[in-house]
Image (cartoon, grey):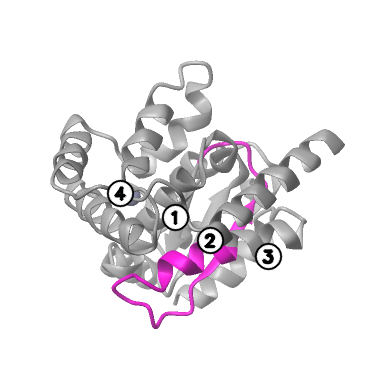
Amino acid sequence: MGAEIDVQVRAQAPLVPDTAAQRALQTLGARLARVSDRPELPYRFALLDLPQANAFAVPGGFVYVTRGLIQRTATVDELAAALAHEIAHVAARHGVERLERELRTGLVVQGLYRLFFGGEPDWLAHRALEIGAALWTARHSRQDEQEADRLALAYLARAGFDPRALARLLRRLAADGDEPAAVEAWFATHPLTRDRLAAIDAALAQRSPQPTAPPPDAAAAYATLRRRLAAQAAAR
Ligand SMILES: [Zn+2]
């Protein structure tokens, strides 16, 4: 099921046309996927050429991240936190039943597509219904969000990242008063409630001290991503 959706997303969504950047994202994601609860899945990570901050996943281990999200991260740990959260939704099989039901009934919600991609590019208006199934992550329940956060903290620690980056990233996005519309999509699909942040803070308080430096290969991958995206932006 996920593989079919991935084919549709890749065919229709605007991927960042830069293999070095795509490879760097895959390197980072794979480091986290290896320590997830379903390491056997063939996780694939794709970098979407969209200015909004967003990330989503479909069953089977397909994870999509926008350049807008990467550009709003301050550290590799923060990007790792977003990836870990998406991997956790996959590993915990969140939303799979709902997606299967929607595929069976042909019920897909075009409006949700706009939450993800902001509704701007032309390509989406025509193809929204076809790839609407990819929206299985839309509006995860509070329980799913909290479980994904809890798992993400564990994956971050296991993979050598600082779990505190998850709280930092969410607070930064929530406080992004300059561009509320640009981060709205992220919170529409991963609702941020006071409970959610409190649960993250409580879990962090119980953790032992964290590493001070990220894994070198991950830091290098992040530097590559930032550099390639900056070059792409300069060339526009
Ligand atoms: Zn989520």
Disc 3 marks a residue whose amino acid type is Ala
Q: Is residue 50 magenta?
A: yes
Q: Which residue is mark 3?
A: 11
* Magenta segment boundaries in residue numbering: 26-53
Q: Are marks 2 and 3 in contact (CB under 8 Å)?
A: no
Disc 2 marks a residue whose amino acid type is Leu
Which residue shows up at 44% across the image and 43% down it? 78
| Residue 129 visible | no
Disc 1 marks a residue whose amino acid type is Leu
10 Å crowding of disc 3: few (<14), some (14-19), many (20+): few
Q: Which residue is mark 4?
A: 210
Disc 4 marks a residue whose amino acid type is Gln
Q: Nearer the viewer, residue 71 or 162?
A: 162
In primary-sequence order, the first of circles 1 and 3 is 3
Q: CA distance from mark 1 to mark 2?
A: 8 Å
Q: Are marks 1 and 2 in contact (CB under 8 Å)?
A: yes
In primary-sequence order, the first of circles 1 and 4 is 1
Q: CA distance from mark 1 to mark 3?
A: 22 Å
Mark 2 C-beta closer than 8 Å to ligand 1: no
Which residue shows up at 64% across the image and 60% down it? 24
Q: Which residue is mark 1?
A: 83
Q: Is residue 134 magenta?
A: no
Q: Which residue is mark 2?
A: 28
The picture places residue 137, in percent across and down from the top left corner, at 37, 55
Q: Is residue 165 left or right of residue 18?
A: left
